[in-house]
Amino acid sequence: MSRASITASELMAQLNADPEFVKRRADRDAALEKWSKRLRTEEEPLLADLRKVGWEVTSAWELVKTSTPYPEALPVLLSHLSRPYSTRIREGIARAMAVRDACIYWSTLRDLFTREKEKEVRDALAVVLSAASNGSLITQLAELAKDPANGSSRLLLLRGLRRSKSPTARETLAELANDPALAKEISSWRKE
């Protein structure tokens, strides 16, 4: 015997009639609002410094979404990246630095990447290093991608190597195509 199907609106009506469901949803919404408010308060020093250089944003994540260049914001972001913010804020700061103009901070970003313990922030820093890499940095990017100590973040470093026309990048990708942790990703490019 099959169950009768119901529409989404009928299901929502049933759920909204259940006091336990309504309470769980209200509790979840209240917890989410409390967490969001805490993050907004915590991020305020960064936002104040960004306003000083002309960027009126409510979160570093807004910079991630903009197509307008913001080179004047990069030193501010970098100065806040090593501060003791929560993981979500540090991840947003790092992701906001994932632009070509960040290449001038590559050494510092690489050092932050190699010391970072939080996976989300480490992955965001890998995205930054990949985006900020250029011809003069490709050898360093290749070394990071080859190092198994960099864990799953190496997958994100591959983007910079793939984008490069450098022989070093091509040689590194050919070598990494045999690395069990990276082979599947690299082989998927041939199918595109």
Image: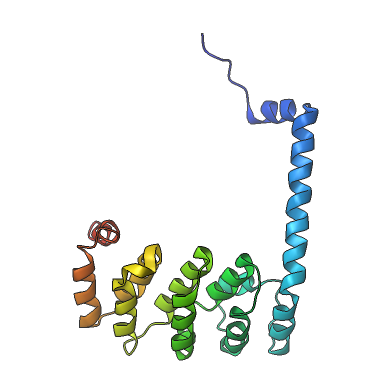
| Res 135 → quadrant | bottom left
Q: Nearer the viewer, residue 117 or 55?
A: 117
Q: Position of residue 14 (x, y in %)?
A: 73, 25
Left or right: residue 91 compared with residue 105: right
Q: Position of residue 30 (x, y in %)?
A: 79, 49
Give the number of marks: 0
Q: Nearer the viewer, residue 59 or 55?
A: 59
Up the image or down, 134 lies above or below 14; here it is below
Q: Quarter holding the C terminus?
A: bottom left
Q: Position of residue 189 (x, y in %)?
A: 27, 61
Q: Position of residue 145 (x, y in %)?
A: 32, 72
Residue at position x 72%, y 89% in the image = 52
Residue at position x 31%, y 72% in the image = 147
Up the image or down, 103 lies above or below 162; here it is below
| Res 88 → quadrant | bottom right
Q: How is the image coloured?
A: rainbow
Residue at position x 75%, y 38% in the image = 24
| Res 61 → quadrant | bottom right
Up the image or down, 181 lies above or below 171; here it is above
